[in-house]
Image: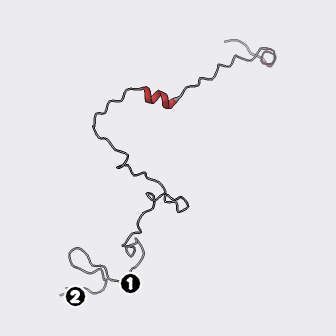
Amino acid sequence: MADLSLADALTEPPPEIEEEIKRDFIATLEAEAFDDVVGETVGKTDYIPLLDVDEKTGNSESKKKPCSDTSQVEGAPSSKPTVLANGDHGIEGNDTTEA
């Protein structure tokens, strides 16, 4: 290994900087052959973009219908009793099956 000193660093010319490589990444991807092994295709009419809802833009596709069941928010108590799938009501303290 060569002995280096501060004088060497100040007197030696800077190393040559390589030229920046510029290429079109998208054009490279489009030029590659694509083998569709799944066979699924999506037409432009079937595609629904997943975008944030922004009321300022006039995009009607991004606007969603409001959820009709807003009373069932996790952690928020509801004033109405909850009817469960088995017919029970989600009311605590009304256990009439005690012996």
**Callout 2 secondary element:** loop
Residue 12's place in the image compared with 66, above or below, is: above
At mark 1, the secondary structure is loop
Across the whole image, how many numbered discs are drawn on residues?
Answer: 2
Give the quarter of the image for residue 14: top right
Q: Which residue does the image show at 20% across and 75% down from the upper left?
A: 86
Left or right position of 70 against 54: left
Whether residues under marks 1 and 2 lie with C-beta atoms below 8 angstroms apart, the answer is no
Name the one closer to the observer, 4 or 70: 70
User: Of all residues shown, which one is farthest toward the top?
Assistant: 2
Give how far across and how far down residue 41 sits, in percent. Answer: 31, 41
The earlier-in-sequence mark between 1 and 2 is 1
Picture disc at residue 5: none
The quarter in which the N terminus is drawn is top right
Which residue type does callout 1 highlight? Ser
Q: Nearer the viewer, residue 78 or 26?
A: 26
Q: Give the image quarter of residue 29.
A: top left
User: Mark 1 — residue?
Assistant: 79
- The residue closer to the viewer here, 14 or 2, is 14
- Image position of 66 with respect to 13: above or below: below
Residue 76, compared with residue 34, is above or below; it is below
The scheme the figure's colours follow is secondary structure
- Please give the residue where the numbered disc 2 appears in the rendered image: 96
Circle 1: is it few (<14), some (14-19), or many (20+) Cα within 10 Å?
few
C-alpha distance separating marks 1 and 2: 21 Å
Snapshot quadrant of residue 43? top left
Q: Amino acid at mark 2?
A: Thr
Q: Where is residue 63? Give x, y as percent.
A: 45, 61
Q: Name the image quarter holding the C terminus.
A: bottom left
Residue beneath the point at 40% across and 72% down: 73
> What residue is rendered at 47% in x and 54% in y?
51
